[in-house]
């Protein structure tokens, strides 16, 4: 199967505004932000969606969430908060089949989503 755009960003084959990376995850700014601040937290491992994660992926999934506050703080979102979103599958509007958390903030966000 061909690589997703996120695999290509992780492999540094195409550029992205990377704001954080470690052995398990890469975070970079979304190319089409839906709010003043919009980043993506992506596991290096190409898990397509949550249904494709297995028992060995617990620590990676936990790491994605546990790192979100530090990444949010780095982006200046710690004081007023932010939203974390996973679009999982077609009806959620998932476009890139590589699991990712959207980290969104910088203004008051509407709820519920459309
Ligand atoms: P989703 O619809 O949840 O799969 O979200 C995919 C996200 O990836 C969208 O918000 C896109 O704007 C974003 N995106 C697609 N290509 C790139 C890219 N080359 N660099 C940064 N973000 C991207």
Image (cartoon, helix red, strand yellow):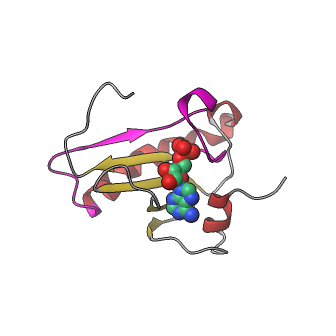
Q: Foreground: 27 or 38? A: 38
**Mostly what secondary structure, the magenta segment?**
loop
Instruction: Decide: is 102 above or below 111.
Output: below
Q: Is residue 34 something one can see in this rendering?
A: yes
Outermost residue, left direction? 79
Q: Which one is in front, 52 or 109?
A: 109
Residue appearing at x 62%, y 73% in the figure: 14
Say whether residue 5 is left or right of residue 17: right
Name above or below for residue 26 compared with residue 100.
below
Q: Residue 81 at what x, y percent from top left?
A: 21, 44
Residue at position x 22%, y 60% in the image:
76
Depth check, front residue: 95 or 83: 95
Whether residue 104 is in magenta: the answer is no
**Residue 34 at x, y percent in the picture:** 37, 49
Q: Is residue 14 left or right of residue 21?
A: right
Q: Residue at x 67, y 66 (%)?
A: 8
Q: Quadrant of residue 48?
A: top right
Residue 97, horizontal then vertical, whole percent: 67, 45
The question of residue 83 being in magenta is answered with yes
Q: Quadrant of residue 19?
A: bottom left
Q: Which residues are magenta?
A: 74-99
Residue 100 visible in image: no
Q: Is residue 8 left or right of residue 28?
A: right
Looking at the image, how many numbered discs can be counted on the residues?
0
């Amino acid at each position: 199967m061909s690589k997703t755009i996120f695999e290509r960003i992780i492999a540094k084959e195409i550029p992205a505004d990377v704001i954080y990376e470690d052995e398990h995850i890469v975070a970079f700014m979304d190319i089409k932000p839906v709010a003043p601040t919009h980043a993506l937290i992506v596991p290096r491992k190409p898990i397509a969606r949550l249904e494709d994660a297995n028992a060995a992926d617990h620590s990676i999934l936990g790491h994605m969430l546990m790192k979100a506050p530090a990444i949010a703080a780095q982006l200046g979102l710690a004081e007023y908060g932010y939203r974390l979103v996973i679009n999982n599958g077609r009806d959620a509007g998932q476009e890139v089949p590589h699991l990712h958390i959207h980290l969104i903030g910088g203004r008051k966000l509407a709820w519920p989503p459309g």
